[in-house]
Image: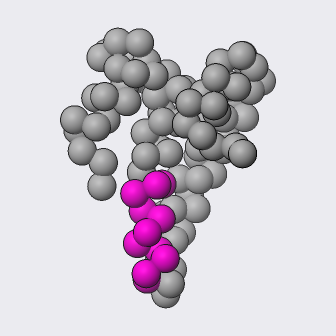
Amino acid sequence: MITTQRSAELTKKFGGSDKNSGSVEVQVAILTERIKNLTPHFEKNKKDHSGMRGLMKMIGQRRSLLKYLAQKDEARYTKLIKELELRK
């Protein structure tokens, strides 16, 4: 579960201001945080298939946002990938 305080921190860091919560970078950062928080749950609860479906939907949403960002502005895409440490 991501707290509103953590969400505000991510919005300020990746959006540039407190009000810019709709930018692609902020959305990807919040989705990444939620995915990282859910991953340990699924390591313990392997049979939680309905929850796993929700996780897969979040991963797909993040993937489509990253694909959009890569097409629109590759510099912002590479900067975001580096800051969130999504690729190795």
How are the residues colored?
Answer: one colour
Q: Is residue 78 magenta?
A: no
Magenta highlight: main SS: helix
**Above-or-below relation of 76 to 3:** above
Outermost residue toward the top? 17
For image coordinates 43% across by 83% down, the residue present is: 45
| Residue 62 percent location from the top left of the image | 59, 43
| Percent of width and height locating residue 25 | 53, 26
Per the rendered image, the range of residues in magenta is 35-45
Judged left or right of residue 85, residue 73 is: right
Q: Nearer the viewer, residue 65 or 9?
A: 9
Q: Is residue 41 left or right of residue 81?
A: left
Please state the horizontal and vertical placement of residue 78, each as a whole percent of the image.
70, 25
For the question of whether residue 48 can be seen, the reply is no
> Who's the residue at 68% across and 25% down the image?
77
Q: Residue at x 56, y 57 (%)?
A: 57
